[in-house]
């Protein structure tokens, strides 16, 4: 279900970042959400993108922050630069896949760029429970000018360590993740390349590490991107060829196969389909290892040779 919403504030944070605040149109309040949740925003052209709810958890207004990626005509660029107060968009109910462990005693947050956004709401929640003094945030940005929400973080009493890419002494993500304190929990949100950097030291956290990505698994894998493959449709007997430069989802839609989808980034799980045969190169962030034995997210995952789908 989508909630019709009005833009009530547009705030330019940096040259690359814009914050948008929404209020529901046909209801008094938004549904409650846990800090760290995201919403799916449907744009005027029907495309849907996932954005973290990055203010203090509230039912009256929701806030997201958008980073325009510089690609002309891209969804994020249009949302960041063309949205005005009074515009109306549709937002989904909260998607809660990344949230605080209520039993944690101490917190270490790692944010890479726009990956700060879900962490902001978590820091608001910790501030409300007088836990901010046990929090440290390592914030990786390309330069100090691209850091966002610093004034708010200061008001929350969070210890923020900014690691700017234009500083020669910047530590690596792996260095700031290593050596957890007893009882400390790790929360990470950033690009897949940062997760690849910290993965070797995550076992030190003994199950107390949680992460969310703002990209798909595809750029974590050292595989050829240009090999096509075939999808055999078990129910209809059809065959769909997936080209070198298109996703399995795009190929299915092009062939007239009705598949629900939303984020197109392997995160929300809406497009997941059942696999009956073949080898899948999984690149999603929504399926467990067990689920991947019999399912795939066609928006990001690819096949090797021929893959049979229950479609």
Image (spheres, rainbow, N blue to C red):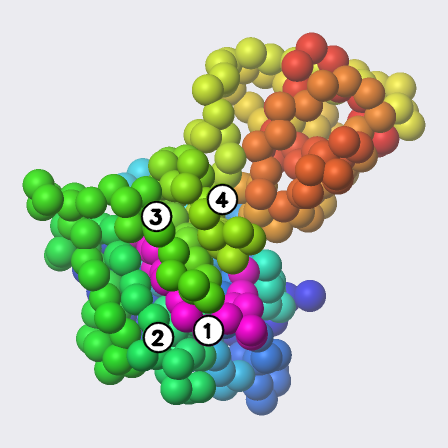
Looking at the image, is 24 positioned above or below residue 135? below
For disc 1, the marked residue is 105
**Camera-side residue: 100 or 236?**
100
Q: Residue 134 carries which label?
A: 2
Mark 3 or mark 2: which comes first in sequence? 2
User: Looking at the figure, which quarter contains the N terminus?
Assistant: bottom right
Q: Do the residues labelled 3 and 1 touch (CB within 8 Å)?
A: no
For disc 3, the marked residue is 178
**Camera-side residue: 236 or 188?**
188
Q: Give the CA distance from mark 1 to mark 2.
A: 8 Å
In this view, which residue lies farthest toward the front?
182
Q: Which residue is drawn at 88% across and 24% down?
A: 234
Name the element at disc 1: loop
Answer left or right for 76 relative to 18: right
Q: Give the CA distance from mark 4 to mark 3.
A: 10 Å
- The range drawn in magenta is 98-119
Residue 76: in sight, yes or no? no
Number of other residues with Cα within 10 Å of mark 1, as a class: few under 14, some 14 to 19, many 20 or more: few
Residue 40 % position (x, y): 55, 59
Residue 237 % position (x, y): 89, 19
For disc 4, the marked residue is 203
Number of other residues with Cα within 10 Å of mark 3, as a class: few under 14, some 14 to 19, many 20 or more: some
Q: Give the CA distance from mark 3 to mark 2.
A: 17 Å
Q: Residue at x 68, y 48 (%)?
A: 270
Q: Are marks 1 and 2 in contact (CB under 8 Å)?
A: yes
């Amino acid at each position: 279900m989508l909630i019709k919403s009005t833009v009530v504030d547009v705030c330019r944070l940096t040259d690359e970042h814009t914050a948008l605040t929404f209020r529901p149109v046909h209801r008094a309040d938004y549904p409650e959400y846990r800090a760290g949740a995201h919403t799916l925003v449907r744009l005027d052209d029907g495309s849907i993108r996932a954005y973290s709810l990055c203010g203090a958890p509230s039912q009256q207004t929701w806030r997201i922050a958008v980073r325009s990626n510089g690609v002309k005509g891209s969804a994020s660029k249009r949302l960041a630069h063309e949205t005005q107060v009074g515009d109306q968009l549709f937002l989904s109910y909260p998607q809660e896949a990344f949230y605080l462990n209520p039993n944690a005693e101490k917190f270490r947050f790692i944010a890479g760029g726009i990956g700060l956004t879900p962490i902001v709401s978590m820091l608001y929640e910790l501030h409300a429970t007088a836990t901010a003094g046990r929090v440290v945030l390592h914030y990786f940005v390309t330069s100090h000018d691209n850091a966002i929400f610093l004034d708010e973080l200061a008001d929350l009493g969070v210890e923020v360590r900014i690691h700017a890419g234009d500083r020669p002494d910047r530590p690596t993500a792996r260095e700031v993740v290593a050596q957890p304190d007893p009882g400390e929990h790790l929360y990470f949100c950033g690009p897949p390349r940062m997760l690849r950097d910290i993965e070797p030291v995550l076992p030190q956290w003994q199950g107390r590490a949680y992460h969310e990505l703002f990209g798909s698994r595809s750029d974590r894998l050292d595989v050829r991107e240009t090999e096509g493959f075939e999808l055999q449709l078990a129910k209809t007997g059809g065959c769909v060829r997936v080209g070198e430069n298109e996703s399995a989802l795009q190929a299915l839609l092009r062939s007239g196969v009705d598949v629900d989808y939303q984020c197109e980034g392997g995160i929300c799980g809406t497009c997941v389909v059942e696999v009956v045969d073949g080898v899948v190169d999984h690149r999603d962030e929504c399926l467990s290892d067990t689920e991947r034995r019999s399912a795939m997210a066609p928006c990001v995952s690819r096949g090797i040779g021929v893959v049979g789908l229950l479609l």
